[in-house]
Image: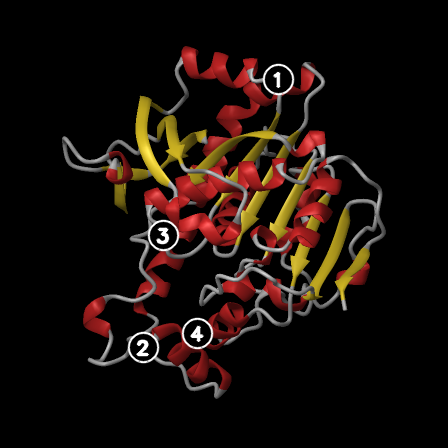
Amino acid sequence: MRTSVYFVTNRAPGPAGAQPAEAFGPLMVGMESRALSCGVAFVTNTTPDPATLGQRQVEEVADVTADMFSATTLADILGSGKNLLFFVHGFANSFADAITRAAFNREWFAASGVPGADCTVIAFTWPSAGRVVDGQDVVPGAATVLLSLLGFALSRKLRSPLANRYKLDQSNARSSGRDLARTLDRLAPLVRQVRAQGRKVFLLAHSMGHVALEGAFAGWNTSGQNPEMRFDQAVLAAADSDFAFAGHAPPWLEQMPRLADRTSVYVSAEDQILMVSEAVNSIQRLGEKGPPDAAALPADRFCLVDCSGVQDRVAEQEIDFTHQYYRRIPEVRDHIAAAFAGEPRPGQVVLGG
Protein backbone atom coordinates (compact mmCIF):
# COMPACT_ATOMS: atom_id res chain seq x y z
CA MET A 1 0.00 0.00 0.00
CA ARG A 2 1.18 3.54 -0.79
CA THR A 3 0.05 6.36 1.48
CA SER A 4 0.20 10.12 0.94
CA VAL A 5 1.26 12.29 3.87
CA TYR A 6 0.94 16.04 3.49
CA PHE A 7 3.44 17.78 5.74
CA VAL A 8 4.54 21.12 7.13
CA THR A 9 7.95 21.41 8.79
CA ASN A 10 10.30 23.93 10.33
CA ARG A 11 13.22 21.55 9.79
CA ALA A 12 16.08 22.75 7.62
CA PRO A 13 16.24 20.98 4.24
CA GLY A 14 18.76 18.19 3.84
CA PRO A 15 21.71 18.39 1.45
CA ALA A 16 21.16 18.53 -2.29
CA GLY A 17 20.53 15.08 -3.70
CA ALA A 18 19.53 13.58 -0.34
CA GLN A 19 17.34 10.50 -0.27
CA PRO A 20 13.62 11.20 0.35
CA ALA A 21 13.90 9.93 3.94
CA GLU A 22 16.52 12.63 4.57
CA ALA A 23 14.85 15.44 2.65
CA PHE A 24 14.72 17.39 5.92
CA GLY A 25 17.19 17.06 8.75
CA PRO A 26 17.40 17.37 12.54
CA LEU A 27 18.10 21.13 12.66
CA MET A 28 15.64 24.01 12.73
CA VAL A 29 15.47 26.33 9.75
CA GLY A 30 17.46 29.53 10.32
CA MET A 31 15.89 32.50 12.03
CA GLU A 32 16.89 34.82 9.18
CA SER A 33 14.25 33.34 6.88
CA ARG A 34 12.08 31.23 9.16
CA ALA A 35 10.21 29.89 6.15
CA LEU A 36 8.26 26.70 6.69
CA SER A 37 8.36 23.93 4.09
CA CYS A 38 5.14 22.32 2.87
CA GLY A 39 4.84 19.31 0.62
CA VAL A 40 3.67 15.75 0.19
CA ALA A 41 5.52 12.53 0.96
CA PHE A 42 4.65 9.09 -0.36
CA VAL A 43 5.16 6.15 1.99
CA THR A 44 5.29 2.52 0.87
CA ASN A 45 4.50 -0.71 2.75
CA THR A 46 1.82 0.93 4.86
CA THR A 47 -0.47 -1.54 6.55
CA PRO A 48 -2.50 -1.10 9.75
CA ASP A 49 -0.39 -3.70 11.57
CA PRO A 50 1.56 -2.21 14.52
CA ALA A 51 4.16 -4.99 14.33
CA THR A 52 5.25 -3.83 10.85
CA LEU A 53 5.77 -0.12 11.52
CA GLY A 54 9.49 -0.35 10.83
CA GLN A 55 8.91 -1.67 7.30
CA ARG A 56 7.52 1.60 6.01
CA GLN A 57 9.70 3.75 3.78
CA VAL A 58 9.54 7.30 2.48
CA GLU A 59 9.62 6.65 -1.26
CA GLU A 60 9.24 10.19 -2.57
CA VAL A 61 8.94 13.80 -1.40
CA ALA A 62 7.27 16.12 -3.89
CA ASP A 63 5.79 19.56 -4.56
CA VAL A 64 7.71 21.29 -1.74
CA THR A 65 6.83 24.98 -1.42
CA ALA A 66 7.47 27.69 1.16
CA ASP A 67 4.98 28.54 3.91
CA MET A 68 1.86 27.13 2.21
CA PHE A 69 0.91 24.11 0.14
CA SER A 70 0.91 24.61 -3.61
CA ALA A 71 -2.38 25.07 -5.42
CA THR A 72 -2.07 21.52 -6.72
CA THR A 73 -1.56 20.04 -3.27
CA LEU A 74 -4.39 22.12 -1.79
CA ALA A 75 -6.68 20.84 -4.54
CA ASP A 76 -5.63 17.25 -3.75
CA ILE A 77 -6.46 17.71 -0.07
CA LEU A 78 -9.79 19.35 -0.80
CA GLY A 79 -10.63 16.73 -3.40
CA SER A 80 -9.94 13.74 -1.17
CA GLY A 81 -13.49 13.77 0.16
CA LYS A 82 -12.21 12.65 3.57
CA ASN A 83 -11.99 14.18 7.01
CA LEU A 84 -8.61 15.70 7.93
CA LEU A 85 -6.29 14.38 10.64
CA PHE A 86 -3.56 16.79 11.76
CA PHE A 87 -0.71 14.92 13.51
CA VAL A 88 2.06 16.29 15.77
CA HIS A 89 4.70 13.69 16.68
CA GLY A 90 6.75 13.20 19.81
CA PHE A 91 10.35 12.72 20.97
CA ALA A 92 13.10 11.10 18.88
CA ASN A 93 11.35 11.24 15.52
CA SER A 94 13.50 11.88 12.46
CA PHE A 95 11.79 13.32 9.40
CA ALA A 96 11.32 9.77 8.08
CA ASP A 97 9.96 8.61 11.46
CA ALA A 98 7.44 11.44 11.57
CA ILE A 99 6.22 10.82 8.03
CA THR A 100 5.99 7.03 8.30
CA ARG A 101 4.17 7.26 11.64
CA ALA A 102 1.71 9.73 10.16
CA ALA A 103 1.14 7.28 7.30
CA PHE A 104 0.62 4.44 9.73
CA ASN A 105 -1.84 6.49 11.79
CA ARG A 106 -3.89 7.12 8.65
CA GLU A 107 -4.18 3.40 7.89
CA TRP A 108 -4.53 2.41 11.57
CA PHE A 109 -7.57 4.60 12.21
CA ALA A 110 -9.11 3.75 8.84
CA ALA A 111 -8.89 0.08 9.87
CA SER A 112 -11.27 0.80 12.77
CA GLY A 113 -14.12 0.54 10.28
CA VAL A 114 -15.52 3.90 11.39
CA PRO A 115 -16.08 5.86 8.15
CA GLY A 116 -15.20 9.20 9.73
CA ALA A 117 -11.82 7.85 10.87
CA ASP A 118 -10.70 7.20 7.28
CA CYS A 119 -8.84 10.51 6.98
CA THR A 120 -6.42 12.49 4.88
CA VAL A 121 -3.40 13.14 7.11
CA ILE A 122 -1.34 16.32 7.52
CA ALA A 123 1.76 16.13 9.72
CA PHE A 124 3.60 18.95 11.44
CA THR A 125 7.14 17.71 12.00
CA TRP A 126 9.51 19.65 14.26
CA PRO A 127 13.30 19.12 14.41
CA SER A 128 14.61 15.95 16.03
CA ALA A 129 17.50 13.68 15.16
CA GLY A 130 15.41 10.59 15.84
CA ARG A 131 17.80 9.32 18.51
CA VAL A 132 17.02 8.52 22.14
CA VAL A 133 20.63 9.21 23.18
CA ASP A 134 23.81 10.33 21.43
CA GLY A 135 26.49 7.70 21.05
CA GLN A 136 29.09 9.68 22.97
CA ASP A 137 26.73 9.88 25.94
CA VAL A 138 26.46 6.12 26.40
CA VAL A 139 29.12 4.10 28.21
CA PRO A 140 30.52 1.16 26.21
CA GLY A 141 28.49 -2.01 26.64
CA ALA A 142 25.20 -0.27 27.46
CA ALA A 143 23.03 -2.48 25.26
CA THR A 144 19.59 -1.46 26.51
CA VAL A 145 19.75 2.25 27.10
CA LEU A 146 16.04 2.77 27.67
CA LEU A 147 15.89 0.02 30.28
CA SER A 148 18.83 1.64 32.03
CA LEU A 149 17.03 4.96 31.89
CA LEU A 150 13.92 3.37 33.36
CA GLY A 151 15.93 1.91 36.22
CA PHE A 152 17.36 5.33 36.98
CA ALA A 153 13.93 6.90 36.76
CA LEU A 154 12.30 4.47 39.16
CA SER A 155 15.01 5.18 41.72
CA ARG A 156 14.68 8.94 41.06
CA LYS A 157 18.40 9.21 40.32
CA LEU A 158 18.36 10.11 36.63
CA ARG A 159 21.06 12.60 35.68
CA SER A 160 22.80 13.89 32.58
CA PRO A 161 24.36 12.90 30.17
CA LEU A 162 21.79 10.20 29.30
CA ALA A 163 19.11 12.89 29.16
CA ASN A 164 21.02 15.21 26.80
CA ARG A 165 19.22 14.17 23.63
CA TYR A 166 15.85 14.31 25.38
CA LYS A 167 16.53 17.85 26.62
CA LEU A 168 17.57 18.99 23.14
CA ASP A 169 14.39 17.59 21.60
CA GLN A 170 12.35 19.21 24.34
CA SER A 171 13.96 22.57 23.59
CA ASN A 172 13.30 22.13 19.86
CA ALA A 173 9.66 21.22 20.50
CA ARG A 174 9.19 24.27 22.72
CA SER A 175 10.87 26.55 20.16
CA SER A 176 8.60 25.11 17.45
CA GLY A 177 5.46 26.34 19.20
CA ARG A 178 5.21 29.60 17.26
CA ASP A 179 5.75 27.74 13.98
CA LEU A 180 2.98 25.30 14.89
CA ALA A 181 0.68 28.23 15.70
CA ARG A 182 1.61 29.86 12.39
CA THR A 183 0.93 26.61 10.56
CA LEU A 184 -2.51 26.18 12.09
CA ASP A 185 -3.45 29.79 11.39
CA ARG A 186 -2.32 29.59 7.78
CA LEU A 187 -4.22 26.36 7.21
CA ALA A 188 -7.41 27.81 8.69
CA PRO A 189 -8.85 28.84 5.28
CA LEU A 190 -8.30 25.28 4.00
CA VAL A 191 -10.04 23.90 7.07
CA ARG A 192 -12.98 26.24 6.61
CA GLN A 193 -13.39 24.94 3.06
CA VAL A 194 -13.20 21.35 4.27
CA ARG A 195 -15.83 21.97 6.93
CA ALA A 196 -18.01 23.79 4.40
CA GLN A 197 -18.06 20.50 2.48
CA GLY A 198 -19.52 18.80 5.57
CA ARG A 199 -16.24 17.17 6.57
CA LYS A 200 -14.53 17.23 9.96
CA VAL A 201 -11.02 18.10 11.13
CA PHE A 202 -9.16 16.36 13.96
CA LEU A 203 -5.96 17.00 15.91
CA LEU A 204 -3.79 14.15 17.21
CA ALA A 205 -0.77 15.06 19.35
CA HIS A 206 1.52 12.46 20.90
CA SER A 207 4.11 12.62 23.67
CA MET A 208 6.49 15.61 23.35
CA GLY A 209 4.32 17.03 20.59
CA HIS A 210 2.34 18.56 23.45
CA VAL A 211 5.33 20.77 24.30
CA ALA A 212 5.01 22.25 20.80
CA LEU A 213 1.24 22.59 21.31
CA GLU A 214 1.82 24.39 24.63
CA GLY A 215 4.25 26.67 22.80
CA ALA A 216 1.59 27.42 20.18
CA PHE A 217 -0.76 28.66 22.88
CA ALA A 218 2.06 30.77 24.32
CA GLY A 219 2.45 32.38 20.91
CA TRP A 220 -1.26 33.10 20.56
CA ASN A 221 -1.43 34.49 24.09
CA THR A 222 1.63 36.72 23.58
CA SER A 223 0.17 38.17 20.39
CA GLY A 224 -3.27 38.57 21.95
CA GLN A 225 -4.82 36.48 19.19
CA ASN A 226 -7.12 33.49 19.14
CA PRO A 227 -6.29 30.46 16.99
CA GLU A 228 -7.63 30.81 13.47
CA MET A 229 -7.96 27.01 13.23
CA ARG A 230 -10.92 25.10 14.62
CA PHE A 231 -10.86 21.33 15.25
CA ASP A 232 -13.93 19.19 15.78
CA GLN A 233 -12.00 16.85 18.06
CA ALA A 234 -8.53 17.00 19.65
CA VAL A 235 -6.88 13.80 20.87
CA LEU A 236 -4.01 14.32 23.32
CA ALA A 237 -2.25 10.97 23.74
CA ALA A 238 0.48 10.19 26.32
CA ALA A 239 1.27 13.88 26.81
CA ASP A 240 4.89 14.45 27.82
CA SER A 241 4.27 17.85 29.37
CA ASP A 242 3.85 19.12 32.94
CA PHE A 243 0.64 17.86 34.51
CA ALA A 244 -0.11 20.96 36.56
CA PHE A 245 0.55 24.63 37.15
CA ALA A 246 -0.04 26.10 40.61
CA GLY A 247 -2.04 23.03 41.59
CA HIS A 248 -4.41 23.20 38.62
CA ALA A 249 -4.52 21.95 35.04
CA PRO A 250 -1.90 23.62 32.81
CA PRO A 251 -3.30 26.87 31.36
CA TRP A 252 -2.84 25.68 27.77
CA LEU A 253 -4.97 22.60 28.49
CA GLU A 254 -7.73 24.73 30.01
CA GLN A 255 -7.60 26.85 26.84
CA MET A 256 -8.08 23.91 24.47
CA PRO A 257 -11.75 24.90 23.86
CA ARG A 258 -10.32 27.89 21.96
CA LEU A 259 -8.88 25.39 19.47
CA ALA A 260 -11.21 22.38 19.54
CA ASP A 261 -14.89 21.73 20.14
CA ARG A 262 -14.02 18.66 22.20
CA THR A 263 -10.73 17.41 23.71
CA SER A 264 -9.97 13.83 24.78
CA VAL A 265 -6.93 13.35 27.04
CA TYR A 266 -5.56 9.77 26.97
CA VAL A 267 -3.47 8.77 30.00
CA SER A 268 -1.81 5.69 31.46
CA ALA A 269 -0.14 5.22 34.83
CA GLU A 270 1.68 2.25 33.23
CA ASP A 271 3.51 4.47 30.71
CA GLN A 272 7.17 3.66 31.42
CA ILE A 273 8.53 6.34 29.08
CA LEU A 274 6.67 9.02 31.02
CA MET A 275 8.14 7.59 34.24
CA VAL A 276 11.56 8.33 32.74
CA SER A 277 10.41 11.79 31.68
CA GLU A 278 9.06 12.54 35.16
CA ALA A 279 12.52 11.82 36.59
CA VAL A 280 14.19 14.04 33.98
CA ASN A 281 11.75 16.92 34.51
CA SER A 282 11.18 16.46 38.27
CA ILE A 283 7.44 16.77 37.78
CA GLN A 284 4.65 14.32 36.91
CA ARG A 285 3.68 14.23 33.25
CA LEU A 286 0.19 15.04 32.00
CA GLY A 287 -0.04 11.70 30.20
CA GLU A 288 0.41 9.67 33.38
CA LYS A 289 -2.78 10.49 35.30
CA GLY A 290 -4.04 13.71 33.77
CA PRO A 291 -4.26 17.09 35.51
CA PRO A 292 -4.82 17.24 39.30
CA ASP A 293 -8.27 18.79 38.89
CA ALA A 294 -9.49 16.77 35.91
CA ALA A 295 -12.99 16.60 37.40
CA ALA A 296 -13.19 20.39 37.24
CA LEU A 297 -12.71 20.49 33.46
CA PRO A 298 -16.06 21.04 31.69
CA ALA A 299 -17.46 17.59 30.87
CA ASP A 300 -19.05 18.90 27.68
CA ARG A 301 -15.64 19.97 26.36
CA PHE A 302 -13.21 17.43 27.87
CA CYS A 303 -12.95 13.68 28.33
CA LEU A 304 -10.17 12.04 30.37
CA VAL A 305 -9.55 8.46 29.17
CA ASP A 306 -7.59 6.14 31.47
CA CYS A 307 -5.81 3.47 29.39
CA SER A 308 -3.84 1.92 32.29
CA GLY A 309 -5.87 -1.29 32.14
CA VAL A 310 -5.75 -2.00 28.40
CA GLN A 311 -3.74 -5.02 27.27
CA ASP A 312 -1.19 -4.81 24.46
CA ARG A 313 -1.28 -8.09 22.53
CA VAL A 314 1.07 -7.03 19.72
CA ALA A 315 3.76 -9.69 19.43
CA GLU A 316 6.49 -7.20 18.54
CA GLN A 317 7.14 -5.54 21.91
CA GLU A 318 9.06 -2.31 21.26
CA ILE A 319 10.93 -0.86 24.21
CA ASP A 320 8.44 2.04 24.36
CA PHE A 321 5.30 -0.03 23.82
CA THR A 322 3.63 1.27 27.01
CA HIS A 323 3.92 4.77 25.55
CA GLN A 324 2.44 3.88 22.16
CA TYR A 325 -0.90 2.36 23.18
CA TYR A 326 -2.84 4.74 20.94
CA ARG A 327 -1.32 3.13 17.82
CA ARG A 328 -0.95 -0.45 19.09
CA ILE A 329 -4.15 -1.43 20.90
CA PRO A 330 -7.41 -1.74 18.92
CA GLU A 331 -9.55 -0.89 21.96
CA VAL A 332 -7.85 2.51 22.27
CA ARG A 333 -7.93 3.07 18.50
CA ASP A 334 -11.65 2.30 18.34
CA HIS A 335 -12.34 4.66 21.23
CA ILE A 336 -10.51 7.45 19.39
CA ALA A 337 -12.33 6.60 16.16
CA ALA A 338 -15.65 6.85 18.00
CA ALA A 339 -14.61 10.30 19.21
CA PHE A 340 -13.91 11.27 15.59
CA ALA A 341 -17.41 10.09 14.77
CA GLY A 342 -18.81 12.42 17.42
CA GLU A 343 -19.99 9.75 19.83
CA PRO A 344 -21.08 11.40 23.10
CA ARG A 345 -19.22 10.37 26.23
CA PRO A 346 -18.86 11.37 29.89
CA GLY A 347 -16.06 13.48 31.32
CA GLN A 348 -14.04 10.48 32.50
CA VAL A 349 -13.72 7.01 30.99
CA VAL A 350 -11.74 3.91 32.03
CA LEU A 351 -10.70 1.44 29.33
CA GLY A 352 -9.75 -2.20 29.97
CA GLY A 353 -9.29 -3.45 33.48
Residue at 84% from the left image edge and 42% from the top image edge:
344
Under tag 1, what secondary structure?
loop
Query: Sequence-wise, which precedes: disc 2 or disc 1?
Result: 1
Closest to the camera, between mark 1 and mark 4, is 1
Residue 72 appears in the picture as rendered: yes
| Three-letter amino acid code at the position of disc 1 | Gly
- Mark 2 sits on what residue? 160
CA gap, disc 4 and disc 2: 9 Å
Closest to the camera, between mark 1 and mark 3, is 1
Residue 350 image position (x, y, % from top left):
78, 62
| Residue 279 against residue 339 in the figure, above or below | below
- Mark 1 sits on what residue? 81
Task: Tell me the crowding category of disc 1: few under 14, some 14 to 19, or many 20 or more residues within 10 angstroms, Cα based.
Answer: some
Residue at 55% from the left image edge and 19% from the top image edge:
190
Residue 145 image position (x, y, % from top left):
34, 74
Q: Residue furthest front?
A: 315
CA gap, disc 3 and disc 4: 16 Å
CA gap, disc 1 and disc 4: 44 Å
